[in-house]
Amino acid sequence: MRNGLSRTISGLVVGAAIASGIGLVSPRAFAQAASAPVAMQGVTYLTGGIGEDEVQQLRAAAAKYNLRVTFASKTGAYLSDIDVSISTESKRDVLSIRTEGPLLFVQVPPGRYILTANYAGKAQTKHVAVPAKGAVDIVLRWDEVDTGNAHGAAVQRCPGCARRAGRPAPSSAP
């Protein structure tokens, strides 16, 4: 009776998970799906970097991208949900997205670009020369923003991106 009851409960739990759309997917499979390259407006980009598996996946793909940007606070916390726009110097829009983690890798044609990143209403603009060979690595840092939440942390701080003890602050791509 006990085995039958256990099987019934297990079957109900699995059935409920599938019916509710949760599904039973391994965290590794989710991380891989979350960091798929996206082709948009004539460029390809990859954004993410939440969790060790995803960071490793992005690091492995980094050489395929010639513009790589890391977003962090001045205290070293990685940031997510950054509104980013990239345009040519002649003001032609190339890409406009919201990041899904502290890393953004973009493959653009060689040339001069204006990168604007907005975190909590504070914009930073960088003029970037992307070479024909090689890549450009940029780290953008913001002051912490007190949004008035219960913990005093910035709402857009990258969940799951908190530095481990002893891990250095991001001075380049994590």
Image (cartoon, rainbow, N blue to C red):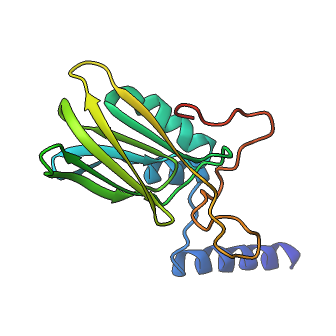
Point out residue 59 in the picture as x, y percentages from the top left corner: 49, 31
Q: Is residue 56 left or right of residue 108?
A: right
Residue positioned 72% across, 73% down in the render: 10
Residue 37 seen: no
The C terminus: image quadrant:
top right
The N terminus: image quadrant:
bottom right
Residue positioned 58% across, 41% down in the render: 53
Q: Nearer the viewer, residue 15 or 93?
A: 93
Q: Nearer the viewer, residue 35 or 141?
A: 141
Point out residue 117 in the picture as x, y percentages from the top left corner: 40, 53
Point out residue 125 in the picture as x, y percentages from the top left corner: 36, 48
Point out residue 5 in the picture as x, y percentages from the top left corner: 80, 79
Q: Is residue 24 left or right of residue 85?
A: right
- The answer to which image quadrant residue 11 occupies is bottom right
Q: Is residue 115 above or below residue 80?
A: above
Q: Is residue 39 above or below residue 173?
A: below
Q: Nearer the viewer, residue 32 or 113?
A: 113
Question: Residue farthest to the right?
Answer: 2
